[in-house]
Amino acid sequence: MPIRLSGMVSGMDTESLVTALVSGYKVQKDNLVKAQTKLSWKQEKWKTMNTSIYSFYSGKLSAARMSSAYSLKKSTVSDSSAATVTASSSAVAGTQKLKVTKLASSGYLTGGEITSADKSKVTGSSKITDITGSKGSLNLSVDGKSTNIELTDDMTVNQFIVKLKDAGVQASFDENNQRFFISSKTSGKEGDFTLVANDTDGMASLNKLGLSTSIYDSNKTDDEQSATYKEYKKWADYWSAYNKPGLSDDEKANTELGKLISEAYESQKADFDTVAKELLDNYSNAVAAKDSFENKYQSDTGLSAKDNANAQLTSKQARLDQLEDTKKKNNGTLGDDDQKEYDSLKASVDELTEDIGNYTKNNELIDEYEKKKYVKVVTNDTGTKTVSAIKETDSSYSPAGVSYIKGEVESRNKQLYSDIEAEYTAKAKNSSDMLSNIQSGTGIYAASKGAVRIDGQDSEIELNGATFTSNTNNYSINGLTIQVTAVTKANEPVTITTDTDVDAIYNSIKDMFSEYNKLIKSMDEAYNASSSKGYEPLTDDEKDAMSDSEVEKWETKIKDSLLRKDDTLNSVINTLKNDMASSFEVDGKLYSLSSFGISTLGYFASGENEKGVYHIDGNKDDTSTSGNDDKLRAAIAGDPETVISFFSKLCTKVYTDLGNKMASSSVSSAYTIYNDKQMNTQYSEYNTKITAAENKVTTWEDYYYSKFSAMESALAKLNSQSSSMSGLFGS
């Protein structure tokens, strides 16, 4: 940048002169800035308008297209404290009688307060056996799933809670109150749980844990007893039937206990393909382990991997023995260095011993597999190829291998059946043995002090004399959704009244038009705005010469007019107005908005920018038409299906046409009315042009300043020379 001397010699106002000389270029730049500013304002104006259009499109208009959006029916209940009812369009109009006889509830077990053997406070880390003094076996049944929980020596309270949760209930321990809390995850009879003991130790543990509740009531029938008692009684009956003298194996298998054993066995038993795949996996693992060993202990000395490993083991064991002798001589201690060597050798010897042992076992396993060709029997892509298929396709089929696998299957299944039978029969026998003691309710069979049990139960209602049950308090019956909240008094049913929901349908239509009117009015206001001819965005210098309020008023004038007579906006306005004026056929008859008392006020009666606004006759919120007959409400009450059909068709047409206007194109994005892509491009182009204009101003300023600087320097030299000559002549 040249040195800018401001008339120091000439006395000229250089800065003003340069400013005047480049003013033409500054005007060009300022015009570009103004144009860009105006474009940005227009973008914001369109964004606001587009938001309003899309909000209407995706909100009220979209919903009004669907017949399901209109609430055809409504139901009222004579006693809302007993039930709440909502009606779908399929609900039958009229009155119905409802009795609520039971409410659904979840199963709850609130444990009694417990103490540990040493009277210390029980925490999550406390051991169960410190509370119970014994171990024992428990069984938790939830929705047909039975899980045994074994109380071990090292089981903590927290671990016990985890076992309960894994078995299918919600469980916690309150350390402040020293109580267990157990509840079912779902309400209803099927979601309930039973927690019982499998043996006397388990019963004693339940009592000590505060989880024994009043199991048996001698004043009640078996059907009236607690769920816990029923569980014991059920298994005792199973045992009695299963252990009946003289039963054949087939007869035993046909008892309830026999069926349970069979079901458990069938779900767990091994088959040929499963065992074959397991054996193949074992073989593959053995081969991999063998290869890993040989890679680990390979030797360059000609020794095999096993011999090399044994040689290392012998050498390290010998040195380890030496250190052991030294340790004994030093009263069981070693120096620091020797101790480090000892620890390293000990770990290495243990590793070598284990590796060599596993290598031997793996070799034996591999030899056995290869001898009987087990691999050939089971080799295939998926691991599930059948024996018959192998016989047909594999020449290497091995009868010996198949026989072995069949033997494995038979042996495993026999042991599995034996284990399952032992588990189920033991549970049944223990229940039978304990039943009389449970009925006595004494000792370990007594209820824990403070323990409370609430059985889960289904809700039950009568609707028009028919009985319905549910595991929740909710029902869906013939178009009605019923939520019961209280048991009704005997012989005092509540009345459900169902009818057309005139208000809901009316309000849906009214709300849609409210949104439409706001939108069409704002669009008309923007399109018919006053001209801002002669108004352009202000430069900084122009703003400095005006007050803030004057600047705001000036800019508002421009912004309000940016969409004036805009062709795109006019196209959308016309589309909406034309669609709203459409007629549609319903059941062979032609309808329009006027058929339902909905219309504009006309050209001359409408206010400014309200010629496209619709009014509903009889609408109490509309002073223009509130005094007219309410044709819409009357139509809904008389023939709701016709009203809904017409408005669904009308709104579908508006929705479709408006959606087409917002379709994506090369100049606009999806769901956008205006050419937003094109405007963004134009804005970027203005940035380029403004930068170029600014550079031109700077270039010319630098040029003129360099010329004036040169002139000032020349004048300075001239003055200096004149002074020297004057001095010479003067002398």
Image: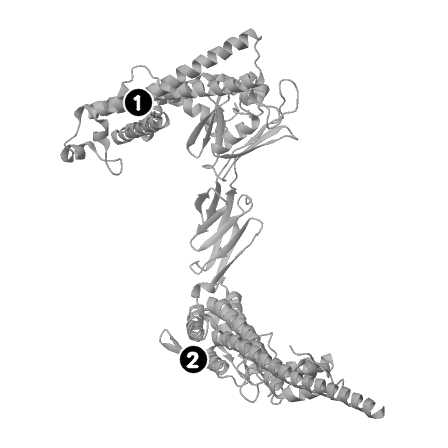
Alpha-carbon neighbours of circle 2 within 10 Å: few (<14), some, or many (≥20)? few
Query: Foreground: 36 or 488?
Result: 36
Q: In this view, does 316 lie to the left or right of 8?
A: left
Looking at the image, is 434 positioned above or below residue 717? above
Which label belongs to residue 598? none
Of circles 1 and 2, the one toward us is: 1
Q: Which residue lies furthest to the bottom in this view?
A: 729
Q: Can residue 52 be seen in this view?
A: yes
Q: How far apart are marks 1 and 2 (CA)?
A: 99 Å
Q: Is mark 2 on a helix, strand or loop?
A: loop
Residue, disc 1: 302
Q: Is residue 526 above or below residue 236?
A: below
Location of residue 179 in the rendering, given as x and y in whole percent from the top left corner: 61, 29
Side of 381 relative to 89 (left or right): left
Q: Which residue is at 77% across, 86% downward?
A: 720
Q: Which residue is drawn at 23% across and 27% down?
A: 374
Q: How many neighbours does mark 1 have within 10 angstroms: few (below 14), some (14-19), or many (20 or more)?
A: few
- Return the x and y of residue 621 as percentages of the image width and height: 60, 74
The answer to whether 343 is drawn above or below residue 162 in the figure is above
Which quadrant of the figure contains the C terminus? bottom right
Three-letter amino acid code at disc 2?
Answer: Ser
**Left or right of 452 on screen, residue 357:** left
* Residue 150 place in picture, x, y as percent: 48, 23
Question: Cβ–Cβ below 8 Å for labels 1 and 2?
Answer: no
Which residue shows up at 70% across the image and 87% down it? Answer: 714
* Front residue (pair 75, 262): 262
Return the residue at label 2: 582
- Viewer-proximal residue among 163 and 338: 338
As drawn, the residue found furthest toward the right would be 731
